[in-house]
Amino acid sequence: MKWLNKIIGRQNQQKQHTTATISFYELEEWVANESRVELDEFFESAAHTFAEIARTKEQLMRDINTLETAVEPPEVPTRASRVGLAARDNIMKQVNVLVDKIDIPAGDYSDIVNFCRSVDDYIETTLGKSSRSYHQAKYLFPKEVGTVISDIRSIKKLLKKLEDSLDGTKAEVRNFDEISGRIQIIKDTTEDITRYNSEINDASSKMSDIQDKINDCTARLEQLSLSKEWSSFVELENELKQTEKERDNIETSVVELFMPLGKALNRMKKQSTSGRHTLSKKQMELLDGCLKNPISADAADIDDFLTEVCRLIEGGTLGLRDKKRDKILDQIKYIVESFASKKEVYENLSSRIADIEHKIADLTISETKTTLEKQLAENTRKLTQLEDKLENLKEELEIRSEELENQKKELSDAINSIKPVQIVFD
């Protein structure tokens, strides 16, 4: 039989050390049960202490009633009587507030902590601020006041006993609070991951739809390139680009013609603004045009304006040095000789561009191509934005997933510091 008992005992030991398996979603209930088990001794002790506090409270209520009905001794000086009775009223008022505060909690740990803190703080306040009242009332009612003070001190001692018990459970409570906090963190992280996955799926679906639209636009543009009008359209577009380039070159060359006049023209503008030399409204417009967009001016107007500029330069109004003055006068002469021909070429090119644009607009393919290209550009832009968003979401999902694994490990370690438990997270 001894061998059988040894086997049975060994089996019982193995059962006792078997690791429990708990679903993550059952952990909160498990923590609540384990905390009750761990704190069972505390709650049992607290119940006894609260019973003593309740009895002392009842005694305090009886003793305060005795103080209220007590009769002052005879032959007490009038002033002492008045002060002592007022002090008794003050004591009764504060003690009644204390009695109301001693509302025994149902048994929740945090309620017990709050109860101890609240009642103990008020007792400290009552005994501290009312010490003078106690001494004044004690002159008339020494026995009754002494009994009330004794009751209050007894309650304070019981609170100290309860607080000592609380101190002994802080580590356990802190562990369970930490575990509860870790459980909530995992829930929050899991919700984040679910949300990221949903946003990733949504972005992927939108990208697929947009890609289909891009493919459709591309295919329709390819079909256009096979149409009869396509060769005419391409030829006109190439001609338009070439003509626009030639016009731009003319415009640039005219700007370069007027650049050497910049200093003189700006000085004219400054002098006109200050009133030293007043230009007409038309001359001011031509001056601004020469500085910003000279090709837009009329050739004849430019000739007249530059003649006025020469007159001011030669008359010394602009205060230019000889060398600088001569260079500018030479440049003005060159502009007068070449501007009209450049202007004529520019206007011819502009007319040619307008004619080509009109021909392109008359083609049926033009509007269709423009619409498709706009759609293609817009969908491409949207696709790029979604690609960037998707990349950011995936990076964030990876970070949160790593955090979740670390959080699970930390939770398992915290749980197993209390009892061997295997947590099933899926």
Image (tube, rainbow, N blue to C red):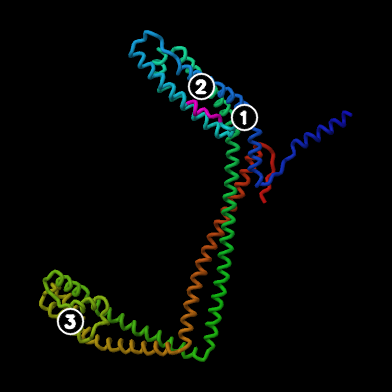
> Is 80 colored magenta in this rendering?
no
Q: Any mark on residue 181, and which?
A: none
Please provide percent x and percent y for residue 53.
55, 23
Question: Could you tell me the amino acid type at mark 1?
Answer: Phe
Task: Decide which of 100, 75 is in the foreground and name it.
Answer: 75
For disc 3, the marked residue is: 305
Q: CA distance from mark 3 to mark 1?
A: 104 Å
Extent of the magenta region: 98-104
Q: Residue furthest right?
A: 1
Lateral position of residue 390 relative to residue 73, left or right: right
At a point 26% along the width and 76% down the height, the residue shown is: 292
Query: Quick one: label 2 or label 1, which is nearer the N terminus?
Result: 1
For disc 1, the marked residue is: 43
**Can you say whether 256 is above or below 92 in the image?**
below
> Is 103 colored magenta in this rendering?
yes
Q: Any mark on residue 61, and which?
A: 2
